[in-house]
Image (cartoon, rainbow, N blue to C red):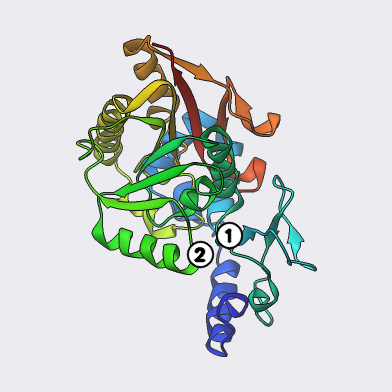
Amino acid sequence: MDALFGHRGGGLVNAVLRKLAGEGEPDPDSASPAERWSHPEDLVDRWTAAFGPERTEALMRWNNGIPDLGACMGGGGEGLAPGSWLQDYRILPRTGSSPLESLDGPFYLQDEAAALVGRTCAGLAAGLDVLEIGAAPGGKTHHLGETAVSVVSMDSSPGRMERWMGNFRRLGWTGCHPLVGDGTRPPLACSFGMVLVDAPCTNTGVYRRRPDARWKWSADYLEGMTVLQRELLASASALVAPGGYLVYSTCSLEEEENQGQVRVFEECRDDFRRVPLDAPAELVTDGAIGIFPPEHGIDGLFAVAWRRVD
C-alpha cells in the first residue's frame, strides 16, 4: 500500500494485509474445504465438479492471497518486476517508497489479465469507431483509445462513469466520449466497427482482488447474470456494422457466463463468425481467451470475438 500511496498509514494497512495473509492458510480441523478456505459451500462443490478437487483447492488458495498491481508502461519502470505475459507490464512493489513519480507517460493501474484483454481488443479496434458497453472505470478504454478512431464509452452507472471521467481527465484520452446508458437498450442509432461488451458477471475470476464478492454467490445470482449477459449480447450485436467485430468479455470462471453464452449466441446468429484473439497460445482455446488464475498467475478472465459477415 505504501507503493501506491506513499503514506505512513500504508504501514498499518500492510500489517493488516500481512496478518490476513498469514490467516490465509486453512484450519486443518475445519470440516470442509469451503470452511477451511472461507468460500461458499455450494460454489466449492460446483468448482470441484467442474475443475476437480486439486485445481479447486489451488484456486481457493490463490483467492486468499494478496493481489499484485501494475501497469503497462511506455516509459520508466526500471527496477520493477516484469509481468508474465506482456512485455511492457510492470508489477509495483507492495512495500517501500512509491515508484509512481519516476514513471514516464500515462499509465493505468490494473491486473495484467485486464491489460492483456485490453491490448487484444485494441488490436481489433485499430482504425475503427468503437462502442464500449460496461466501460467504467476505463481499464479497456485506456487501451482502445490508443488505436481506435473514436470510442463511445457507455456504462449504466453514473457513479462508475464519474470514475471514468476522473481517469479521462488524468490520462488525457483523446477521441473517447462518455455516455451513461442502459446496455440492453443503448440510446444509439448508429453502427460501429467494433462493439465491446465488458459484461457484468459473478466475478468468480477476481475473488483475490474482490474477496467480498464471493459472498454474493448464489445460483439465482448466476442465473440473473446470464440473463443480463444474453440481453447485452443481443443489443450489442445489432450495433455492429457489416464486417465489424463483436467482443464479449467477463471476469468469471463459470461455464454458463463464458462458453455457454458463446454457444447460445452462435446457435442463434449465423451472421457472426468467431475470430481468434491474438494472445499467448497458452491462454487461448478455440480462439477465445480463458485464464485460470492459479495456473496462469493473473486474474481469471474470458474473452471471445466474432466478425459480422453480412
Residue at the far bottom: name it. Answer: 8
Q: Which of 263/76 is in front?
A: 76
Residue 32 makes an appearance in the image: no
Q: Which quarter of the image is occupied by the C terminus?
A: top left
Residue 186 lies, with reference to residue 50, above or below; the image says below
Name the residue rendered at 49%, 45% in the picture: 205
Circle 2 Cα neighbour tier, 10 Å, few/some/many (<14 / 14–19 / ≥20): some
Q: Which quarter of the image is occupied by the N terminus?
A: bottom right
In the image, residue 82 lies at what x, y percent? 75, 57
Say which amino acid is labelled 2.
Leu
Name the residue rendered at 20%, 40% in the picture: 187
Residue 171 is labelled as 2
Q: Secondary structure at mark 1?
A: loop
Q: Which of 256/279 is in front?
A: 279
Nearest to the eye among marks 2 and 1: give it.
Answer: 2
Q: Which residue is mark 1?
A: 65
Name the residue rendered at 53%, 37% in the picture: 121
